[in-house]
Structure formats: C-alpha cells, structure tokens
Image (spheres, rainbow, N blue to C red):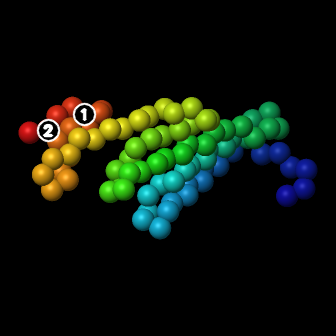
C-alpha cells in the first residue's frame, strides 16, 4: 500500500503457544494518520492455569490458587473458596 490512509481500521493479533494458550494479544487502531493500540501478555503456571496479565508494562491481573488433594483447586483469588 503506497501513501494510503484508512480511517477507523482496527487490527487484532493473537499469539498462542504450543499448548494453545494465549501468550499475548495486540490491538491496534488507525486514527489521525497514526497507529495506536496496546499489547496484553499472559503467563501460566506449571499446570496451565492463568497467573498474570500485563498491559503496557503494568500488571493488570494476578491470580493465586490454593490446591488440595489431587491438585484440585480449593480457592482462587478472584472467586473465593470452593466446597
């Protein structure tokens, strides 16, 4: 594309690891002849549970889990305790 501006365009990109977990996503939008946007990065623990989300270098989510017998989740930081 040569010298062409396209207003109100949004571009989404998603990147997955070999376990099909979302590693990061990018959202970009074209506004005023400039691309703007952000990137979110995701991390997982050893048993594939979401641990953190980071956006623009700032951690926006941190998950903790407490497990019991057979590594079953007994509590989760965003949901409380399970019975």
Label 1–label 2 contact, CB within 8 A: yes
Judge by depth and name the residue closer to the eye, 58 or 11: 58
Residue that badge 2 annotates: 82
* Residue at figure coordinates x 57%, y 32% from the top left: 58
Q: What is the secondary structure assignment of the residue under circle 1?
A: loop
Residue located 44% across and 34% down the image: 61
Which circle marks residue 8 in the picture? none
In the image, 75 versus 39, the foreground residue is: 75
In this view, 7 is above or below 80: below
Please state the horizontal and vertical placement of residue 54, each as a whole percent of the image.
53, 38
The residue singled out by tag 1 in the image is 79
Q: Is residue 30 visible?
A: yes
Q: Position of residue 29 (x, y in %)?
A: 68, 41
- Where residue 19 appears, x then y in whole percent? 42, 65
Compare residues 27 and 54 and report the one nearer the observer: 54
Residue 8, can we see it?
Answer: no
Q: Is residue 9 above or below residue 31?
A: below
């Amino acid at each position: 594309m040569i010298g062409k501006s396209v207003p109100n365009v949004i571009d989404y990109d998603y990147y997955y690891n070999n376990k099909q977990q979302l590693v990061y996503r990018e959202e970009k939008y074209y506004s005023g002849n400039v691309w703007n946007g952000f990137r979110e990065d995701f991390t997982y623990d050893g048993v594939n549970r979401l641990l953190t989300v980071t956006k623009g270098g700032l951690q926006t989510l941190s998950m903790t889990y407490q497990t019991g017998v057979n590594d079953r989740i007994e509590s989760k930081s965003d949901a409380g305790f399970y019975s």
